[in-house]
Amino acid sequence: MITIVRDYVSDMKIVIAKNAIPSEKYAAEELRRWLFASTGTALPIIDDEGNYESKEFILGENKHSRQAGVSITNANLGADGYVLRTVGDSIAIVGGKPRGTLYGVYAFLEDYLGIRWFAQDCTHVPKRCCLSVGDIDERYKPRLNFREANYSDAFTDPDFTARLRMNGSLCNATEKHGGRIKYAQPWVHTFFYFCKPEDYFAEHPEYFSYYDGERHDGHTQFCLTNDGLFEVVLTKLRKWIEENPDCTVFSISQNDWFNRCQCEKCSAIEEEEGSPMGPLLRFINRIAEAIEPEFPNIFIDTLAYRYTRKPPKLTKPRKNVIIRLCSFECCFYHDLGNDSCETNSAFKEDTKGWGKICDNVFVWDYVVNFPHIVMPFSNLFSLRENVRYFIDNGVKNLFEETCWYENAEFEPLKTYLLGRFMWNPDSDVDLSINEFLAAYYKTAAPFIRRYIDLLYKRYADIPNYHCGIYTLPTPEVFTDQLLTDAEEMFDKAYKAADDSIIRHRVEIAAMQVKYLRLYFTEWNSEGYAEKVDRFFTEADRLGVRHVHSWNDNEIGKKRFLNNQYNTVHPPTGDPSLL
């Protein structure tokens, strides 16, 4: 049994290598910081120049870890895994480079001190007079290599992102956080980054999609069997890689609409492969093979998205190709393991298919209703199950597309859950939710939980209920009685809140119901403009800057006043062009 007691601060030390990398130094600082916050014990940080003695936190592979008999040689921990072991009266946390030791420290603090980083502005640190630890012998390697969500809470503070153990491209992690798996930007829908119609179409219309009897320069894709286009893309890619030496992944991916090339050559490959992915994957493989001798550590990424989602029959991705499979058309109320949801059947088959032929499957998943990012989105209890489904079917990388904006529907809660489940998909769902609510809403938490239970009971009571990323709210789902009951819960939550911070958080959550009330108000009815103005004034006061994706509140307000709030305006323009 190892015990750290306040009165014996000099008895334990934190030891790192003299030449420790920045993330190992930061791991030592984080361990000291949070041990002090919990126990009041401030441990010294020393290097490994002297010999191993006893009563040490040994961080990272160093002289002391080797003398203590802890090594990760051949442990296959990857960049993020770690070994956590007690050795006599010492504790060794030794991880893969560059992030494993830091992530091992966070795991130790969570699992043995009960510390939780729930949100950027909400950390739970149990106070202890001492810390007692029994025998430990753990080895953990996360089952997902790339873990990321783009809620604002997940990437605006890299310290918090690291504590969630998200390591994706958006988080601006520095060396002290162990860096990140960095995509070159732009990282999706990049065809026109390589070859724009305005630059090439006049002289080379053959580079672009052929359909309806002619080549097109507007809302077009590439003719992927054209050798001239191949050389243009390859030349641009080589330059792009050289200009971004810190990036390891470069995306060559279709534009965000349909209109694929249907020329004779492209169509023949489609038929042979049984999927429009055929021409695209052959093109990507050819590019990946061409750059591999010069750039052996670079991956080429492409989308399996909408019309390219189905795997080809014959061609398999090369080892340096990443397939980003998108769940765009799915129902997100039913988890993917639920065989009763026919909406998800085709995507499930495609996921299984890609998992069988590709070692680098990357799922681009969706966890928000884009036109209505403030209203309830019924995926709270499918998040973990979907992560597990992906892992069970060979997915190694996961990006959860949410929205970039602060204070979307349950943003802090879902940010925390996504981080937790991507790191450890065996985490208990209800326990994770309830721990968050208790810390974040405190005395108001029971009423927020009752609101959640009201919603999900309603969903369960609706025959054949489904929810996609563009599903419009209806009074058949969100009945007047449900909204009345929800308003009662939020009223009780507000009254139970014992300080202004908690009341503010309750008010933000309550905007879900207020948005639905406004949405269901008959347009241009008596007092309608005043209700719209009142709602958006409150949204601005609370920091809810967007109620629709792609539109700030100024535009959102105009859309309500002009009876346009039911229309979808994605960044690509008129959805009819998709």
Image: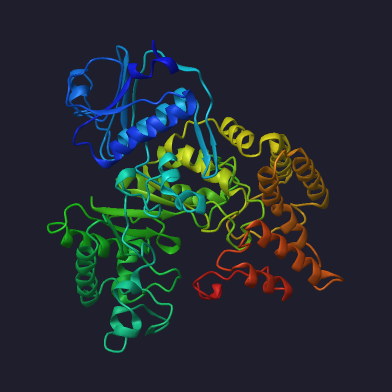
Residue drawn at the location 68% of the way across and 69% of the way down: 565
Image x and y of residue 141, in percent: 33, 33
Q: Is residue 196 left or right of residue 320?
A: right
Task: Give percent across and percent down for residue 206.
Answer: 29, 82
Q: Find residue 394 and report its horizontal and vertical position in percent.
A: 36, 41
312 sits to left or right of 117: left
Quarter residue 370 falls in: bottom right
Taking the spot 59% from the left edge, 55% from the top edge, the residue there is: 468
The quadrant in which residue 47 appears is: top left
Residue 386 can be seen, yes or no: yes
Apparent side of residue 126 relative to residue 68 in the rendered image (left or right): right
Camera-side residue of 536 and 194: 536
Q: Quadrant of residue 34?
A: top left
| Residue extending farthest left | 293
| Count of numbered labels shown in the rendering | 0
Q: Give above or below for 79 relative to 351.
A: above
Looking at the rendering, in which quadrant would you find the N terminus?
top left
Residue drawn at x 26%, y 28% as measured from the top left: 46
Is residue 178 visible in the rendered image? The answer is no
Q: Position of residue 492 (x, y in %)?
A: 79, 41
- Residue 376, compared with residue 8, is above or below; it is below
Look at the picture and state if 262 lies above or below 80: below
The colouring scheme, among rainbow, by chain, secondary structure or one colour, is: rainbow
Taking the spot 24% from the left edge, 40% from the top edge, the residue there is: 21
Q: Spot the residue most to the bottom.
A: 202
Note whether 145 is above or below 558 in the view shown: above
